[in-house]
Amino acid sequence: MPDRVMNWVRRLVPSKGAPASLDELVKREFGLRIKNRAHYEEALTHASLLDGDETGLKSNERLEFLGDCALDLAVATDLFHSFPDDQEGALTQRKSKIVNRKTLNLLGDRMGLPAFIRSKMRKKDIQDTVVGNALEALIGAIYLDHGHLRTSKAVLRMLKRHGADEKVHQTVDFKSKLFHWSQSNRKSLDFKVVDERSVDGGSVYVMQVLVDGRVFGEAEGRSKKRAEQAAARVAWKEVFDRGLLADAAPEEVPEPPKQGRPRGPRGQGSRAKAARKKQAEQAPSEAKAPKQRAPRRKPQQVDQAKAVSKPPAARRRMRRKPDEGTNS
């Protein structure tokens, strides 16, 4: 079979396993073809490969910076048009659920990007952050190869392919709240697709929430997960409006520990203390005698012989001694 026919068949039946080449990875994940291969080779070159290299290789750090900006702009533009009522804070929170290190590391690993990273590390020793940085650099290479508009569409396509776009809609997980409420009240909870249609080249699902066989909410979404969350939100509002939250079984709240000093095994000390206190209250209070101070200690009597001062003559003789020495 000619190669042209084989390539056509591969495009119709995309591979489900790991991509065999970089061209297949870019085509499958972003829906684009590689035109300038040098950009992509640079995007997958880790800085560790440059140690001791004299061929003029470049690491992917510059393309990582460019891809980070292109990813931010693509996601921010999509959120700006998808949520016209959200203010700056809400839009920033939604964007941070996608454009973060953990999500990028996971996306790069899912698409099989570690197999194409060129570095001096072994494939099993490549860290997750290296994979996330390589994904940003790959987006930067696509930006240089195809421009802003096609890159934005390709990035959104990749995010939707892996379900990362669903994170921006998960402000509150009403589905989990409904399941918790139904289990607490022993009620059956089911999600049922009642309609599926195509709008603007994409699928739209209509989902119903059934509680004990009765419809509690219905909503639609671009995917089944999004439709489930929207329907769960309507159903949760219905549960709240009907006041069914009060039917939930009350949770046993443990008693707080009693304050104070711990008592003995039988409380003998406490009972004796209470008895003394009661006896003191019943008995008339007796005036306490003021405390008497202890008598001060008298100073020891000084020997009178030591206390007697020397006679004046002795003092005169002591003053005369130097004169008598000089006269002799």
Image: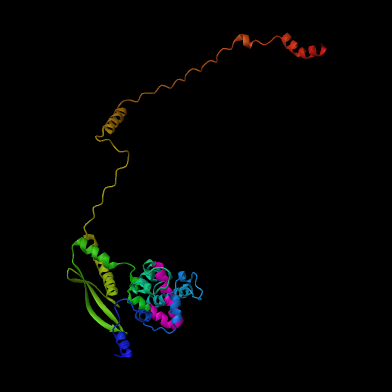
* Residue 268, quarter of picture: top left
Range shown magenta: 126-155
* Residue 304, quarter of picture: top right
Q: Nearer the viewer, residue 278 or 71?
A: 71
**Total marks placed:** 0
Where's residue 60, x and y in %? 46, 73
Q: Quadrant of the N terminus?
A: bottom left
Q: Nearer the viewer, residue 28 or 243?
A: 28
* Most distant residue in the left direction: 213
Looking at the image, can residue 279 be seen? Answer: yes
Looking at the image, can residue 243 be seen? Answer: no
* Most distant residue in the right direction: 327
Please indicate whether residue 74 sits to the left or right of residue 18 in the image.
right
Residue at image point 36% right, 67% down: 124
Please indicate whether residue 216 sits to the left or right of residue 65 in the image.
left
- In the image, is residue 281 part of the stretch drawn in magenta? no
Q: Quadrant of the C terminus?
A: top right
Please indicate whether residue 272 sits to the left or right of residue 326 in the image.
left
Where's residue 315, x and y in %? 73, 12
Where's residue 272, x and y in %? 28, 30
Q: Nearer the viewer, residue 54 or 29?
A: 54
Depicted 205 relative to depicted 92: above or below: below
Q: Tell me which colouring the rendered structure shows.
A: rainbow
- In the image, is residue 148 part of the stretch drawn in magenta? yes
